[in-house]
Amino acid sequence: MFLSFVDPKLVATHLGDQVVTPADVIELLTYRAVKAGTPVFLDEVSMQPVEPLCSWFRHLVYDGKDPKTLREYAYIARRFVHFVESRGRDLLAATESDLVAYHVMRTELQDKPVGDAAWGKEAQLINQLYEWLVKQDYLRHRPIRLTRRGHNPLAPRMRRTMDIRHMSLDQYRYFRDVGLAGQRPDSQASVAFRGRAPLRNRAAADLALCTGMRPEEWSTVLLPELGVGSRRPGEGVEFPVQACAKYGKYREIFAPTGALDAVEMFLLIERPGLVAASAATLARRSRELFVVDQIDLETGKVRGVLEGRRRAFVMSAMDPAMRRITVRETDGGLEALAVFIGDGGLMLGASSWYRIRCEAWKRMLAHAGDPRSPLMPRRRWRWHDTRHTFALQLLSYLEQQMDGEEPDAVARRRRHLAYLGGHVKHNPLLIVSKRLGHASPATTYAYLEFTDDPMNAVDAAFREWSVRDDDTYVDIARHVLASGRG
């Protein structure tokens, strides 16, 4: 069975001199609302679509699954079907013993057995597939029996807690400066460092840490969202995320001044070189790109030309794929609108950030024996660990504001209980909610943003975590700016 993914651009580029023209294929895909990234399973002999897999994945597309999720699901489905076929059956003829055997193979017998998290995702997907097959009358019943409570018997029995891994200040600065930026543990620049764009990597780490954004959010952020060109010095910025957020859930992000200053340094020193080197390449690809010529900061919209048509998008509603191809016209040519770009001039993808993180870990391990290096964890840091660090650091800061310098954990806990016990009677939010006759305190919650600036706590909590004036690469950058050399 051959697996491919729908890509209208490849159709237009490579499908020529055929019975069916590229325009006809693209028109059909548009008519059937088959989006780019949709998995397509083909028989290796006849090259005909393999059913019912193709229909199920089209159902998932119509259900709103994003291309990244669909790709992951497709590889799981292909692996499962290949296993069933190796036992002399097909997807519709699979028995309960086939599913149990697949479970044993994945979690015990293969060279690198998967853990509960990975297997849980596969078991859930297989269960969803057979549930759909029954509803569509491909099968009379599922091959695997459900428990009395309706649970999937293949699902992991162990309940997992959140894998919260956070960094101390020393660990974070070691990760950022030695790992990502290639410094030595004594905070001096390393002549042996052969990595690219240390200021970019440091700025990304500071932005991730000081905002609590997920990697899919901070790595895809656009220049206007960070107030580039419109932010006054010393001010933070707020902007919404949605399409790049988990489950597409809308929320407001606050970026404090420390993180923005780190980004500003990257924009001044390193980014112009990356932009200039890629201008000619982007010009040749202009028809594939969304060329923005108008940015409306008040409404959060960008307008420009995409595929020969005039288009307008709300920035928060732009997914990573759209953000990657969004550029603007400048005096020097086309320039990506994404903040963090690579050698090709476009937004760095997840694989690039993964490679940067892995290389950082190797550099950290190489200096782990230095007495100035902090204690290293057993497993390498993940980008998501900056989000955990943000949550715990901000929570600790807010608790300290409420508890003061109380060193006794028991006393702190007693104070929290007293606060919770009296909050119904004395909580200002609930009192105002009752007086206003709001059906839910959530309605009154909107008033809180006018009583004080809650983002001051973020600025205060992470003031010493972000780039400081005495950091080596900041010294180098300031020296370059002062001397006028780029």
Image: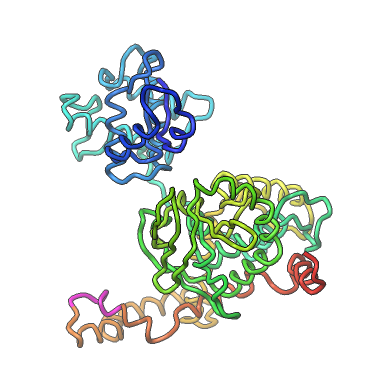
Query: Is 93 drawn above or below residue 419 in the view shown?
Result: above
Residue at the image point whose x is 76% and y is 47% from the top: 366
Provide residue 374's location: percent of width, then percent of height: 70, 58
Point out the stretch of residues depicted in magenta: 439-445
Say which of 307 and 185 sits in front. Answer: 307
**Which quadrant would residue 428 be assigned to in this image?**
bottom left
Viewport quadrant of the N terminus:
top left
Say which of 429 and 50 sits in front. Answer: 50
Say which of 261 and 128 sits in front. Answer: 261
Magenta highlight on residue 158: no
**486 left or right of 47?**
right
**Which quadrant would residue 96 be assigned to in this image?**
top left
Residue 165 can be seen in this image: no
Say which of 352 and 269 sits in front. Answer: 269
**429 left or right of 386?**
left
Provide residue 360's location: percent of width, then percent of height: 68, 50
**Which quadrant would residue 38 be assigned to in this image?**
top left
Residue at the image point whose x is 45% and y is 55% from the top: 305
Query: Is 83 drawn above or below residue 483 in the view shown?
Result: above
By secondary structure, the bulk of the magenta-drawn segment is best described as helix
Magenta highlight on residue 444: yes
Provide residue 125's location: percent of width, then percent of height: 33, 36
Residue 476 can be seen in this image: yes
Q: How is the image coloured?
A: rainbow
Viewport quadrant of the C terminus:
bottom right
